[in-house]
Image (cartoon, rainbow, N blue to C red):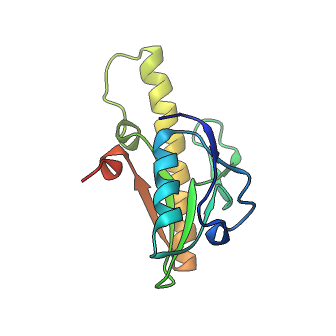
Amino acid sequence: MAYKGKYKPKNPNKYRGNPTKIIYRSGWERKVMQKLDLSSEVEEWASEQVVIPYRSPVDRKIHRYFPDFWVKFSNKKVVIIEVKPNKETKPPKMREKSRKFIREAKKWGINEAKWKAAEKVCETKGWRFQIMTEKQLQPS
């Protein structure tokens, strides 16, 4: 499965935005796009079109977070979905302060700040925020 490419929807009328410019950055994102595109429960969906401001714990500046998906279901519920490897959804395990640990800790801190900001936005709009990992994307 390709890790980066353009997704061509079978139901372009369900896509909110330009359906000729849908980019996936991982095989998992592509899998989610296929599910959203083909699901009869999905009324509308978009990729990286919601902008959420957050403060980075690394540089203390305001940045913009573009969650992977915005989805409106036929029951009118809206969900913001972020697709991440499972290992990036937990803080790194403490070990000596190697460069790898410091890099992972920074990445975790930024992700956590993004997700808290997304949860706050979703709460104010009556939406739900969900992180999907490869565990949810495995065939049943």
Q: Quadrant of residue 25?
A: top right
* Residue 119 is at least partly visible in this image: no
Q: Is 36 placed above or below 67 here?
A: below
Residue furthest left in the image? 140
Horizontal and vertical percent position of residue 7: 62, 49
Q: Is 34 placed above or below 80 here?
A: above
Q: Quadrant of residue 67?
A: bottom right
Residue at 40%, 53% (x, y): give it.
132
Q: Is 32 placed above or below 128 here?
A: above
Q: Quadrant of the C terminus?
A: bottom left
* Residue 20 is at least partly visible in this image: yes
Residue at 71%, 59% (x, y): give it.
19
Horizontal and vertical percent position of residue 134: 35, 44
Q: In this orientation, which residue lies closer to the viewer: 17 or 83?
A: 17
Residue furthest bottom in the image? 75
Q: Tag count in the figure?
A: 0
Residue furthest front in the image? 10
Horizontal and vertical percent position of residue 127: 51, 75
Residue at 38%, 47% (x, y): give it.
133
Q: Quadrant of residue 11?
A: bottom right
Q: In this orientation, which residue lies closer to the viewer: 139 or 58?
A: 139
Horizontal and vertical percent position of residue 45: 59, 67
Q: Is 14 placed above or below 139 here?
A: below
